[in-house]
Image (cartoon, rainbow, N blue to C red):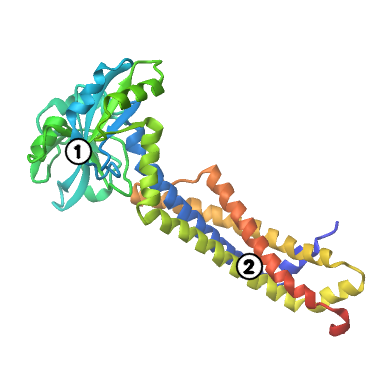
Amino acid sequence: MKIPLAWLQLTKEKSRLLIALAGITFADILMFMQLGFRDALYDSAVVPHKGLNGDIFLMSPKTNSIIAPVGFARRRLYEVLGIAGVQKVQPLYINFAPWRDPVKRGTRNIMIIGINPEQQILAFSGVEENRWALKQENTVLFDELSRAEFGPVASQFKAGKKVFSEVSGHQVKVGGLFKLGASFGADGNIIASDLTIMKIFPRLNPSLIDIGVIKLEPGTDVDPVIRAIREKLNLGDVKILTREEFIDFEVNYWKSSTAIGFIFTLGTAMGFIVGIVIVYQILYTDIANHLPEYATLKAMGYTNLYLLSIVFQQAILLAFLGYIPGLAITLFLYSNTAAATALPIMMTTERAVTVLALTIVMCSVSGSIAANRLRSADPADIF
């Protein structure tokens, strides 16, 4: 059974091989983490959008993201009711206010989602079962996937204790739990009725809403309704979006209007470059140390193409050998990061394949650069 020459060269000096694998593993982990954080940013940003029970959405043209909405006239939403195919409309309020930890008494900004509790507008787990509680005065639902800095609200509520807190200095009672999750824009979330929202923020204009949610009759085609709405609301003070456009709108905000998406993409590129440099140094040193052997192979009649294939075989072997521990360590880091940050960071098949492809390209580029050293492997000069 023949053992490939590339494998023999790699394993001859095991310490150098381990250093090379450590470098590739580090580069892979860096790319995995940067891509993981970037995707977690986009995924967490649109969880509220996906949990809204609607087909068409209205917002102010001045709104750049739902974490910083600009209000528009409530009457514009109700003007839609006369359009064929529209089943119901529902106003949505979004705001931020300091939440007081009921135990440590510290404060931290929390996102407040205001709804009419008579309507089924939110599809998050736990909302429908506890929606009735919002009809009680000064009662909210607490997101049990919020960061721990908001206090042991979920654990106390599950233990049967009555949980009271303050939102912007206004006392509220936790009437139930739901699951939404933290994001880069909001560390935690609560749901309140529209009346409670007005008590928490007494200066809010009741004639303004932040998001208008439109539910269509089952089986209704969205496009004709969108055209009818645009014809009726033609003053330019309302932006009209389909469900897909509403989600893309938020993702594009984080991609293009903030530096966070760019930073994570840049971090991925830096990991790729670091990997190229590390693999190049290893392969170049290996070629330089075995230059007489390569010259001997040339003298025996082996072509430059065969010698180049040896270098590329080494590069591919390094790619796979470094990728495996990088993937294993990343799975561990993802699990711990998700637990510590409450962000939806997890391994996906697409990301695993992407990083594997980047690793192969990274090592191949290093191999092609290092292979230039083979040109000096001239038997006449060496011997």
The answer to the question of whether label 1 and label 2 lie on touching residues, with beta carbons closer than 8 A, is no
Left or right of 10, for residue 51:
left
Q: Position of residue 195 (x, y in %)?
A: 11, 30
Q: Quadrant of residue 143?
A: top left
Total number of numbered discs in the rendering: 2
Q: Which residue is mark 1?
A: 71
Identify the residue at horizontal 84%, vertical 79% (top origin): 378
Q: Quadrant of residue 248?
A: top left
Tell me, for residue 279, which label it has, or none. Answer: 2
Which of disc 2 and disc 1 is earlier in sequence?
Answer: 1
Q: Secondary structure at mark 1?
A: loop
Q: Is residue 159 visible to us here?
A: no
Left or right of 292, for residue 21:
left
Tell me, for residue 127, which label it has, or none. Answer: none
Q: Mark 2 Cα within 10 Å, few/some/many (few <14, many 20+)? A: many
Give whichever of 191, 327 is nearer the camera: 191
Q: Nearer the viewer, mark 1 or mark 2?
A: 1
State whether residue 37 is above or below residue 61.
Answer: below
State whether residue 95 is above or below residue 16.
Answer: above
Identify the residue at horizontal 36%, vertical 24% (top origin): 227
Quarter of the image for the N terminus: give it. Answer: bottom right
Q: Amino acid at mark 1?
A: Gly
Give whichever of 138, 249 is nearer the camera: 249
Q: Mark 1 Cα within 10 Å, few/some/many (few <14, many 20+)? A: many
Identify the residue at horizontal 40%, vertical 42% (top origin): 43
Give whichever of 342, 241 is nearer the camera: 241
